[in-house]
Amino acid sequence: MSTVALATLGCKVNQCESAYLEEIFSKSNYQIRPFTEKADLYCINTCAVTSRAAMQSRQLIRRAARQNGAAKIAVLGCYSQVAAEEIATIPGVTHVIGTSEKLVLLDYISGGEEDTTPLIHLTDVRNAPDPIPLVFSAFANRTRAFLKVQDGCDGFCSYCVVPHARGRSRSIPLPSIVEQVERFLAYGYQEIVLTGIHLGQWGYDSKPQLELTELLRSVLRHCPPPRLRLSSLEPGEILPDLLTLIASEPGLCPHLHIPLQSGDPTILEQMNRHYHPHFYREIVLEAIQRIPDLAVGVDVMAGFPGETEERFQNTYRLIDSLPIAYLHIFPFSPRPGTPAATMGEKISPPVIRRRCRLLRELDKRKRLSFLNRFLGKVRPVLVENRQDKATGLPRGFSDNYLPVVVQADSPLENQILLARLDRIEANRLVAIPA
């Protein structure tokens, strides 16, 4: 029996695709090994969003080559799609496989090639086929199932390489999504997270055109999971109908991740993001007014070209003024082939680091404030299959994405329980079963 080790970088879509590949390998008589061990085949599912992600991909390639110099090393996905020739020069790489090809990678690696030249398998993403519905049962070591419902993006933000790596927006058909939800539920998952490269564009390419709320209503009507959660949605996709649905459906988690990137109108225009900071503010405030316990997560970028101190402060002040739950902070990373990579007025690395530090401090305050709002209250908590490192207690998340550890004597893995949020320790809420 051949052995295979997989490593995954990047987004929830990549994690979903890797889980699918792992099951395909198992069904094809491969033995799954941890990436830290020796294997006959190493697969690295890469990310290209930042230069750091590309660097991590190269590090994993070199690690695999050290662990077994005779192994096949297949580099998959977004970084492969945009930098295939660069990856092919790295010692040890045997296959470079693009985003459209990676889900059928067994077709490319099953032979016993003796050629020492890396084989490159990728097509122009402008002609990318419709995405393959991912039919599989389980995620290794996870109590939440990620379900890819959409691929690609038509946004073309000036800093983002994803449209060049994933192609245009394409939707998984609704019947296939419902079938996969049913499969996850049959396997015992209590929470399903709908995800995509641009989730809010699901259904735009359907005939007739569909909207995300139609997908949600269909799932909730035909196969309602105990919990259904959404990944990231753009500000213009937070529509009144969606907020009404979240407010009225107990199984739809009160949690929205709404990227901001910048709170300055000039920078947003240069980013090719089509909204004004005032619009973003109104969207967040309306959402929280209609869903009082809602957790709102925010993506923000520091150091975009032309971000003066005043423009950065516009971003900082906007975030500081909003009752959000947490931040995801990204230093600007120029990606080859994107308009932002050649824009003038570059921000120096020390200034970017200082701004990231200020945003991280703001993030800590926002997280603590959000946790404090719920002290003494009872929330449903899904307990994961891992212990919290800081407290040693079973860990999990509430429906509104509060990080919780539970004081309990009996096993609670993969159970949703009502828990009283008693106190805060190590940036976690400590809960007692209600």
Image (tube, rainbow, N blue to C red):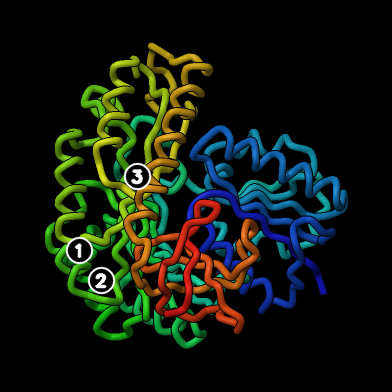
- Kindly check if marks 2 and 1 are in contact, taking CB atoms under 8 A apart as contact: yes
Res. 215 mark = 2
Say if residue 168 shows up in the picture. Answer: no
Residue 277 relative to residue 15: left or right: left
- Direction from residue 425 to residue 329 in the image, left or right: left
Label 1: which residue? Answer: 211
Q: Is residue 33 left or right of residue 334?
A: right
Callout 3 amino acid: Val
Q: What amino acid is labelled 1 in the image?
A: Glu
Residue at the spot of label 3? 298
At a point 72% along the width and 40% down the height, the residue shown is: 59
Q: Quadrant of the N terminus?
A: bottom right
Q: In the rendered view, would you say 337 is above or below 205?
A: above
Q: Earlier in the sequence, mark 2 or mark 3?
A: 2
The residues bearing labels 1 and 3 have C-alpha atoms spaced at a distance of 23 Å
Q: CA distance from mark 2 to mark 3?
A: 24 Å
